Amino acid sequence: AVIGASAAIGAYFLGRGISTLVAGIVLATVVPWTLIAVMPTNLKLLDETRTAQTPETDILLKKWGRLHNIRTIASMLALFMLGANILGFI
């Protein structure tokens, strides 16, 4: 994500258009989202004392899925924007 965001932002400065910059910024949000929102849930799920029977495990897994979906949507949005830019649609 860091490399892709850097490349997209750099491409904007080389004249690839505002949609490339927006795609780079959207892709760049994946890293802080992972560190701030997803990582705490990951750490709770990786707790060695946690089992499938631990009451909170199911709730944490569902929460992780929702958080991961946001990350995936942001990445796919950036990919589609970059692809559309390359193909000349935007």
Image (cartoon, helix red, strand yellow):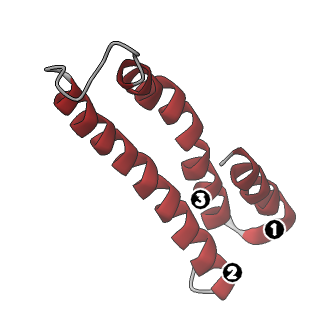
Would you identify the image quadrant in which residue 20 lies?
A: bottom right
Task: Determine which of the numbered discs, if any, sits on residue 46 in the image.
Answer: none
Q: Amino acid at mark 2?
A: Ile
Percent across and percent down for residue 16 are: 76, 70
Q: Are marks 2 and 3 in contact (CB under 8 Å)?
A: no
Residue at point 59%, 56% (across, down)? 22
Find out whether the residues at labels 1 and 2 contact each other: C-beta distance under 8 Å. Answer: no
The secondary element bearing badge 3 is classed as: helix
- Is 78 in front, or is 42? 42
Query: How many residues crowd around disc 2 within 10 Å: few (fewer than 14), some, or many (20 or more)?
Result: few
Q: In this figure, which residue is indicated by the disc labeled 2?
A: 86
Residue where numbered disc 3 is placed: 23
- Tag 1 and tag 3, C-beta contact below 8 Å: no
Residue drawn 64% across and 54% down? 24
Looking at the picture, does residue 77 appear above or below residue 57? below
The quarter in which the C terminus is drawn is bottom right
Helix, strand or loop at mark 1 = helix
**Residue at (57% x, 67% y) in the render:** 79
Residue type at tag 3: Ala
Q: Which mark is residue 15?
A: 1
Q: How many marks?
A: 3
Return the x and y of residue 53 as percentages of the image width and height: 16, 25
Q: Is residue 56 left or right of residue 24?
A: left
